[in-house]
Amino acid sequence: MRDDVLRIAEALNYKKMDRLRGARDVDSDALLEILKSSIVDPYAILFFPRKCFQITPFGMTFSHVLTHKDVNYLIAHADLEEKFLRQAFTGFELVLYKICHIALEDQKPEYHWETQKTRQRFRRLKQLVDVPDWSDFEQLFDNVFYVRDSFAHSFVPLEDIKYKGVPLKYCFGYSYRGRALRDAREHGASMFTDDLEKLFAPIMKVFYQHQLKQIDARKFHKLCDRLIMPRSMSPGP
C-alpha cells in the first residue's frame, strides 16, 4: 500500500520523491493519513490497475483483485450473483457522478448524488467520452441498465432476468469462477459481461484522466514536506 501512495505522489508531481521514497521509517499509515487529509470532497474513490482506494469520512478501504491481468476492479469478479451486479451497477453510477462532479461541475459542494439521475449524467458525458457512435453507445447503456432496473425493481430471479430478450442464465458470459453461461451465443445472442465491459471501458478512461483532481495537490505536497522534514537536515531538492 505504501508503494501505491508513493505512485500517487509521483503522479501529483511531488518534487521530493527521492527523499520520500528513501524515508523508510515513513509507514503506510502516515502516507494514507496524508492522502485522506488532502481530498477535496469528503468522499473519494481512486482506481489503479487491479486496485481500488475508497476514502470516506468513516475511514479508508483498500481492495485489490487477485489476478495478473490489467482489469477494471469493478467488474473483475464477474459472476451471476447479487454481489457482483450490485457492485457493477452501483460502481458505474458512482463513476458517472464523480466524472460530472469533477470534470463538469468543478467539484461544487452543492452538487450531490441526488442532483441528477444516472441517465441524465450519462447523457452529459457525450462531450467527454470518445466512442465511434454515440447513438450505439447510448443504446448499449439502455440495454445494460434494463438489467439494472430489473435487478433493482423486481423479484425476478437473477438467472431469469433478460438481457436483450435472453435470460442471463444463457447469455451472462464467463464467470471468474470458471463457469461459462454462454449457451445462447451460438444463436446470435449478445453476452452480458462482454457488453458490460464495452460500456465501462470509455467511461473509465475519462475517469482515470480526472480522478487525481479529487486530491488537493498543494495540500498533499505540504503535508509530505512536513512528514519528511524532521528526517533530513539537508536542504535537498
Image (cartoon, rainbow, N blue to C red):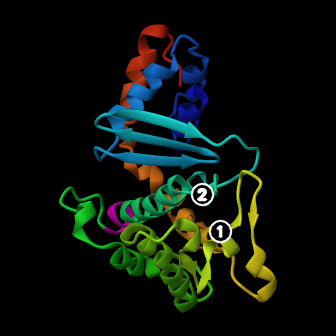
Relative side of 177 to 59, left or right: right
Residue highlighted by disc 1 = 193
Q: Is residue 103 magenta?
A: yes
Q: State the residue at coordinates (61%, 67%).
A: 201
Q: Nearer the viewer, residue 207 or 51?
A: 51
Q: Secondary structure at mark 1?
A: helix
Relative side of 95 to 180, left or right: left
**Looking at the image, residue 3 lies above or below residue 137:** above
Give me the disc on residue 75.
2
**Looking at the image, residue 48 lies above or below residue 61:** below
| Amino acid type, callout 2 | Ile
**Looking at the image, residue 234 lies above or below residue 185:** above
The location of residue 219, given as percent across then percent down, is 34, 35
Q: Residue 163 lies in what quarter of the image? A: bottom right
The location of residue 53, given as percent across then percent down, is 48, 41
The total of numbered circles placed on residues is 2
Q: Residue 34 lies in what quarter of the image? A: top left
Q: Are marks 1 and 2 in contact (CB under 8 Å)?
A: yes
Our reading of the magenta stretch's main secondary structure is: helix
